Amino acid sequence: MRVAEPIPENFWEGDVTRSMGNVQCISWMYPIHISCAYVVLVAGVGCFVTRFYGKALHRWFGVLFLLAMFWTMGASLLIYTTGLPGPIMFFFFIMLVSMSIGLPAIKWHQAQMAARRAEAVDQLVREGKAGVDGVSVAAAAGARVEREMERRTFLERLLSAKALHGLFMTIAWYQIAGRAMVTNPFTSWEGCITYPAMKALDGAGNLVLAPVEGGFDDPVGFAVLVEVPSVLVFVAIAVGGSFLGAWLARRKAANEGETIQLTPA
């Protein structure tokens, strides 16, 4: 079997792979991909450490973890050469499932904590302890809830949404961290070394490489044509929604004998 002529003009390029009007690989995306993977590794460690020390930073390490994960996954779409090995596909699946469990778990926990603090505020008000000794009722309610959380039993801690969050986000972190720890970033990337071919042979039984042309004639122009009007619509909805909300609030206040300005004085 031979390769049918002509060979695409960009076939020998090692920094980029283009075929059928699309882009499969850009070599300079690999440093972005691997750098973000190491950020995921560090952010996960930061999440674990700040669970015990500097707890105020735990949330922000979590945000960094998710953002770096998104960039790692996005950059991987443009370093496509030989596909994914079977084990990596399995690890990737485990990561997505774990994140899909761990993130909603902590959101549910936060909602429960907010409800408990609100209940504690009501109870303090009923007990006449609001603002005692210069402590705000919100701070007193938060302290009461914290004391209740500290007194949980082993099973209550183990079977909590917070523990579920920690377990599954750690599992998700390990799927990328484990690969990052065993990957040599200086030798693992060989560039855009492959080129797609059509599965159907030509009339002479020769292998046909995918043509360079295809897809959109002007991909950037098409993207701009789709994106700009939609962004303007979203901005208009945001402005209109904000104005409508302020107008309704002003109308409600007027019915109650109060005055609210639509715009700052």
Image (cartoon, rainbow, N blue to C red):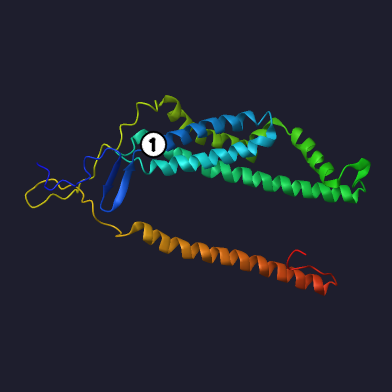
Q: Answer above or below: position of 63 versus 154.
A: below
Instruction: Point out residue 22 in the picture as x, y percentages from the top left corner.
Output: 30, 51
Q: Is residue 109 left or right of residue 212?
A: right
Residue at 37%, 38% (x, y): give it: 28
Image quadrant where residue 81 sits: top left
Q: In which quarter of the image is the C terminus?
A: bottom right
Q: In which quarter of the image is the N terminus?
A: top left
Tag 1: amino acid: Tyr
Q: Is residue 215 visible?
A: yes
Instruction: Point out residue 103 in the picture as x, y percentages from the top left corner.
Output: 57, 43
Residue sitting nearer the eye, 111 or 227: 227
Residue at 64%, 36% (x, y): give it: 58
Q: What element carries label 1?
A: helix
- Looking at the image, the residue that sits furthest to the left is 204
Image quadrant where residue 251 sits: bottom right
Instruction: Point out residue 260 in the picture as x, y percentages from the top left corner.
Output: 79, 68
Residue where numbered disc 1 is placed? 30
Residue sitting nearer the eye, 145 or 6: 6
Q: Is residue 156 visible?
A: no
Residue at 51%, 31% (x, y): give it: 41
- Looking at the image, the residue that sits furthest to the front is 265
Image quadrant where residue 195 sits: top left
Q: How crowded is mark 1: few (under 14 residues within 10 Å), some or many (20 or more)?
A: many
Residue at 78%, 40% (x, y): give it: 145
